[in-house]
Image (cartoon, grey):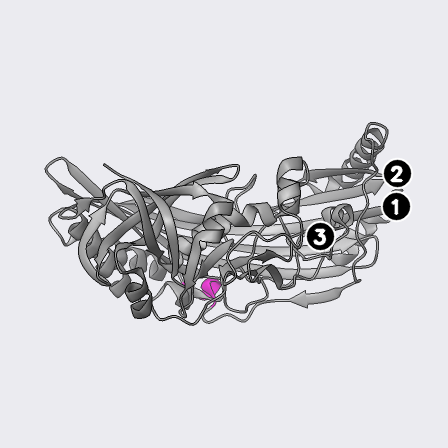
Amino acid sequence: MFEKLKKILNNSKAEYADIRYEKKTSTNIVFNKKDLKTIGANSTDGFVIRVLKNGGFATIAFTKQDDAAKALKIAEENAELISRNIKKPVKFAETEVIKENFSPILNEDPRKISMEEKLELVRKYNNIPLKYEKITTTSTAYFEEIREKYFVNSEGSEINESLITVGIRGRATAKERNLLQDVRIGSGGSDGFYSVKNQEENFEHKTKIALDLLKATPVQGGSYNCILNPSLAGVFAHEAFGHFSEADIIEALPAMRAKMQIGQKIGSDILNIIDDATMPNQLGFYKYDDEGVRVRKVQLIKNGILSGRLHSRRTAAEFNEPLSGHMIAEDYRFSPIVRMGNIYIVPGKTSLNEMFEKLGNGLYILDAKGGQTAGENFTFGGQYGYIIKDGKKAGMIRDLNISGNLYQTLKYISVVGDDFVLGKTGGCGKGQLNIRSCHGGPHILINNLVVGGI
C-alpha cells in the first residue's frame, strides 16, 4: 500500500502533500428489551489527501483509487485559490520523518471472536436488569471498530497503525408509577476483547442504582461544596476545560485566546491536568496522529498555571508552540482536527474518607449524564448522588445538574483525591465523532458549585 500511496503523491506539485488510506470495519449488536434489533458487520475504505501550496491549505476525501489523480488536482487547485484569498499564508511546524508499522498488543483479539460469542455476551448483560420487575426498558449494545491506517507524506514518512476499539454500552430504566429513572452502564477499551468480559457485577450494581433512585429524594437547588467522582471530574476536565486546550478552538476567539495564554494562572495551586495518549492499554491510546506526528504527553495545567496546549502542525506554527501529535480524524471520510486523547486530573494525596471529613456537609455526585458548554460556562448532569452530613452519607438524591463558570470553578477546586480512574467508554462529538476520546482522574472537591434542583 505504501508504494501505491507514494506513487499518487509523486504527481503533486505542492510544497507539501500527504495521503491517508484507511480500511474501517465496524461490528454492531443491539438489544432493546429482549428484542435483538441490530446485528452485523461491514467494511468500508477510502482516502484523504491534504496539500499545502503557496500558503494555501486544502483537503479532499475520496473512495476510489482510480480517482486519486483527479482528487490531487482538485486539492491543489483549491489550495491555490485559498492562497490568493487569505491574508496570512499557512505554515506547518517541522516534524520528524517516521517509517513504522505499529499494531497494539491485544488481550484477546476481537477479530478472532465469533459473532455468536459476541451476541451471547450482549444478551447475557441485557438480561441482567430485566430480571427485576421495576426495570421496564433496557438498551444494550456491543460495538467494535477496527481502523487500519496507512499514511504517507512528501517529506518521507510512511506509517501504518491499527486502532482496535471494543465496547459495551447499556442503559436501564426503572419505573414506579409516573417516576422514571435510568442509569448508563459501559465498559470497553483499545486493548482487546477481554475489556468487555466479566461485566456481570457492573450491570448488577448499576441496575441496583436505577432501582434505588426510585426511592431517592430530588436534590434541593442551591450552592454546595461538592465531591465529584472520577467519571464526573473527568467530564469536567474534558468538556469545560479540555476543548479550550485545543488550539484550533481558541485561535479564532480573541477573548478566549487572551485568557488561555501559556503561563496564565487559571486554577487552584493543587490542580494539575494532563493529556497523555501514550498510556498503553487505555482507551485513548495511539502512537501517531493522522498527520503523521508522534503523540506526546502534554501537561496542560501545572499547579494551576496553564502550561501546554494540544496542536496540529498548522496551529503549532501559528502559536509558535511545540507539536503534540493530537490531530485525529473520525475515519477515512474526514481530514483530522485537534482532539484530546486521555485527559485527566492528576491525583493528589487525600483519601476519599478524608475528603468526606473535609467536606463535612455537602453533596457527593457520581457519574456523568450528558451536558453542554457555552463559552466559559458549563452544565453537566450527574446520574445520582448523596447528601453528606458530618462527613457521612445521609441519603440518596436524584435529578442532579451542576453548572458554573470554568475559570471560577477551576479556582474552587480545593481537594484532589489520591485515587485514579480512566473511563472505559469514551466519545467526543467535536465536529466529528471520536469514540476513543477518554477522560477521568481522581475524586475532586469543588467549593461553591451551583446545583440545579427543586
Residue beneath the point at 60% across and 49% down: 245
Q: Separation of disc 1 and disc 3 at Cα? A: 16 Å
SS state under label 1: loop
Rendering coords of residue 202 (x, y %): 28, 62
User: Of marks 1 and 2, which one's residue comes earlier in the chain?
Assistant: 1
Residue beneath the point at 46% across and 71% down: 107
State the residue in front, 453 or 411: 411
State the residue in front, 205 or 353: 353
Rendering coords of residue 86 (x, y %): 81, 30
Q: Is residue 425 magenta?
A: no
Q: Tell me if label 1 and label 2 are in contact, CB under 8 Å.
A: yes
SS state under label 2: loop
- Estimate how packed mark 3 is, as few (under 14), some (14 to 19) or many (20 or more) residues with alpha carbons within 10 Å: many
Residue beneath the point at 71% across and 61% down: 159
Quarter of the image that includes the N terminus? bottom right
Q: From which residue to which does the magenta span run?
A: 109-113
Q: Which residue is mark 2?
A: 54
Q: Which residue is mark 3?
A: 291
State the residue in front, 111 or 9: 9
Rendering coords of residue 377 (x, y %): 47, 39
Q: Separation of disc 1 and disc 2 at Cα? A: 8 Å
- Mark 3 is on which residue type? Glu
Q: Tell me if label 3 and label 2 are in contact, CB under 8 Å.
A: no
